[in-house]
Image: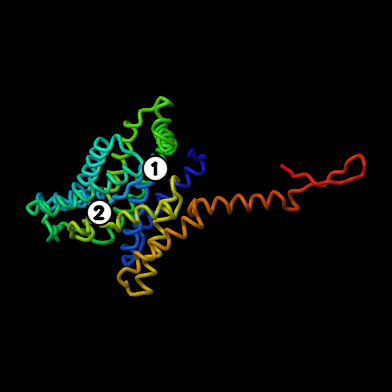
Amino acid sequence: MSFPFNARVSICLMSVTWIAAAWLAPLHHADLIFRASTLIVLGISWNLMANAGLISLAHASFSGIGGYAAAIIAKTFGLSLVAALPTSVIAGMLLGAFLAVSTGRLSGLFFAIGTLAVSEALRVMALMLPDITGGAQGIDVPQGLRLGPHFMGIAAATLAAAALLLSLALSNSRFHYACRAMRSGESAAQMLGLNPRRYRFGVLVISGGLAAGAGGLGAWYTGFLDPRIAFSLDITIVAQIGPLLGGIYTVVGPVFGALALTGVAEATRLGFNGTSGLGQLLYGVILVVSVLLMPHGIVGMFRRLTLHLRGDAARSPASLAVSREGNGRTHTVERM
């Protein structure tokens, strides 16, 4: 969608404020900021694909390949996060390019199943290459290279802000409208003179790079990665729920959804002492409730509330004027 100038400024200020909050936040809030930031990036990444009609059931494949790229580069070559994070992004972009080429004729449900197959194939490869990935025992980031939680929170917040600004830039471009046409149908997009495969390639490369960056930061933050963690279904679930809860196909929807999910996860941890399986149950309940009661997410609910309040204001006594017709009858008209 096309944003007015003040809306674009507000989103830019939101990005800057989020980075500043990560810098100024107390140390014990660094974990919350890190988790929220990585969820924002994953949500934006998934939302970009959904906007093009490409529903990913295995976004963990991007996140996992990014995590392994960062961990391997640290373990093998002793490089810092400054080198590891770009490596993760490049690995995700390459995987996105591979997906675009290998699933070029697939769409809808068949594309979703194809992404699931790729994720499972990557998990098996990670298990079968113990010399590189550590196999089932996993791989760790050397302790000397790891950074404190405060700095990791800042790095994650910066990546989230960059992802949000990228999403904003794309929302006002030809790329965005081409993706919307693809969502309606690739045949219809071809009738408009578009090349669906080219735009599919672009959106998968961008989405893969963002999600892999989040995965690389996650591996560096925890310091350990194995196939079960890297390609966990939980990553795909939260990547989907964020945009659905916040507002799918919108720029700020994944941000609001990620913040809401982080709040729910923290409340669950504090209130129920991290009871096993409760988080997944709550995510399922949130998904069902949001689809049934808020089909357009938090952003859609806010828009409806704004329109409702504007409608009431337009019909308030201050906005009405009384006029008298020639026959003596009166009626009210709205002042513009």
Q: Quadrant of residue 220?
A: bottom left
As drawn, the residue found furthest toward the right would be 327
Residue drawn at the location 92% of the way across and 44% of the way down? 328
> Residue 231: horizontal and vertical position, in percent?
23, 54
Mark identifier at residue 314: none
- Does residue 164 appear left or right of residue 225 in this picture? right
The amino acid pointed to by label 1 is: Ser
Residue drawn at the location 31% of the way across and 65% of the way down? 27
How many other residues sit within 10 Å of disc 1, few (<14), some (14-19) or many (≥20)? some
- Classify 328 as above or below 255: above
> Residue 285: horizontal and vertical position, in percent?
42, 63
**Disc 1/disc 2 C-alpha distance (Å):** 20 Å
As drawn, the residue found furthest toward the left would be 131
Residue drawn at the location 19% of the way across and 49% of the way down? 122
Q: Could you say whether the residue bearing mark 2 is in a helix, strand or loop?
A: helix
Nearer to me, 203 or 90 = 203
Nearer to me, 107 or 63 = 107
Nearer to me, 168 or 247 = 247
Q: Could you say whether the residue bearing mark 1 is in a helix, strand or loop?
A: helix
How many other residues sit within 10 Å of disc 2, few (<14), some (14-19) or many (≥20)? many
Q: How many marks?
A: 2
The residue where tag 2 is placed is 217
Q: Earlier in the sequence, mark 1 or mark 2?
A: 1
Image quarter in which the C terminus is found = top right
> Residue 262: horizontal and vertical position, in percent?
38, 61
> Residue 86: horizontal and vertical position, in percent?
22, 44
Asked if the residue at tag 2 contacts the one at tag 1, i.e. Cβ–Cβ closer than 8 Å, the answer is: no
- Classify 201 as above or below 314: above
The residue where tag 1 is placed is 167
The colour scheme used here is rainbow
The amino acid pointed to by label 2 is: Leu
